[in-house]
Each structure stands twice: as structure tokens, then as C-alpha cells.
Amino acid sequence: MFGVTDTTKERARLLASNPPAWQRPKAEDVAKQLDMRFLYRFGYDFASTHVHPMANDGDQDFYTIAKLKPAHEFPDQRSVLSNTLLVATMIMQEGLNASSLRWRALVYDCVADLRLFLDKGALERMLSFVRLGRMIESGMTLSSPAVESENS
């Protein structure tokens, strides 16, 4: 799509022959250098177990399946999942903004309904997903362009 200029080629050659040596510092090492180990231990290490959904991966399933008493209290994952879905819908919307496919209006509705569901939790806001499913079942080709080009 874009032509590669001689300047760009030369820059790429220089970067390929001299790759950067920088590595991202580890949070624990930075805290030690600053004599603030507590910042890592209580701010990063401990807090991350309540933020990252994989922090206790498997533990909750084990206690649920084994039915051990007393069951541990595990952090609520809804905020992490909601934020993940919100970011996914933002990425989808950006892709749709660049699309010329005729069904994108329905997907916009699905994205809007998903965001409302995340905000309010009401299932009736998800009706656009049912409409999308019915369109697919009826055989509608979702990859049809909105406007046929003159060359086709």
C-alpha cells in the first residue's frame, strides 16, 4: 500500500544490524533498588492476585469440585471480565468503522447492547444477538459489501 523509500530501507537495515539491548526491568528489582520492597510486595505482588484473572487459576475450580470445607473466598472476577469485554467491543467498533460490509449496523447494535448489559446487567438488551443469529440461520451472507464496486 505504501511505497518503501530509500530512507526507510536504510533505517530498517541499521535497526536490523544493531538491535536494541534494552530489556524491561522487573518490578521487584526496581523496588529493591529504590529500597521500597514493600511497594512490590504489597502493591504489585499482592494486589495483582486481585486484578489478574489467572492469579488463582485452578484454585477456585479445585475447591468447587472437591467441595472442601471451609471454601476459600476468591476474588470476584466480574470487573476483570467486564473490562475485557469493554476493550474487545472498542476494538470491534474500530474495525467496523473501517468496514464497508452491509451487516455492520447490526453488529454496532450488538456492541451497544453488550455495553449496556455490562453497565446495567439486563438480558433484554441482548436481543440484537438473537437477530444476528436468525440472520445467519436464514442464510444471509455476512461478508457481502454494502455497495458493489464497479469492477465486480
Image (cartoon, rainbow, N blue to C red):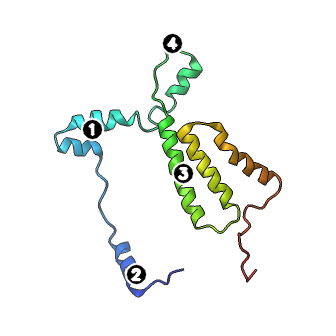
Query: Circle 3 sits in a helix, a strand or a loop, which is it?
Result: helix
Q: Which residue is mark 1?
A: 40
**Which residue is drawn at the image coordinates 31% and 38% (left, top)?**
44
Q: Amino acid at mark 3?
A: Ala
Dots 2, 1 in contact, CB < 8 A:
no
Q: Amino acid at mark 4?
A: Lys
Q: Which residue is mark 3?
A: 88
Q: Quadrant of the C terminus?
A: bottom right
Q: Which residue is mark 2?
A: 8
Q: Looking at this rendering, what residue extends furthest in the left direction?
A: 35
Pointer 2 local density, CA inside 10 Å: few below 14, some 14–19, many at least 20: few
Q: Amino acid at mark 2?
A: Thr
| Closest to the observer, 29 or 95 | 95
Query: Circle 2 sits in a helix, a strand or a loop, which is it?
Result: helix
| Closest to the observer, 136 or 33 | 136
Image coordinates of residue 42 in percent, x first then y, are 28, 33
Query: Circle 1 sits in a helix, a strand or a loop, which is it?
Result: helix
Q: CA distance from mark 1 to mark 3?
A: 30 Å
Q: Amino acid at mark 1?
A: Tyr
Q: Which residue is mark 4?
A: 69
Circle nearer the N terminus (4, 2): 2
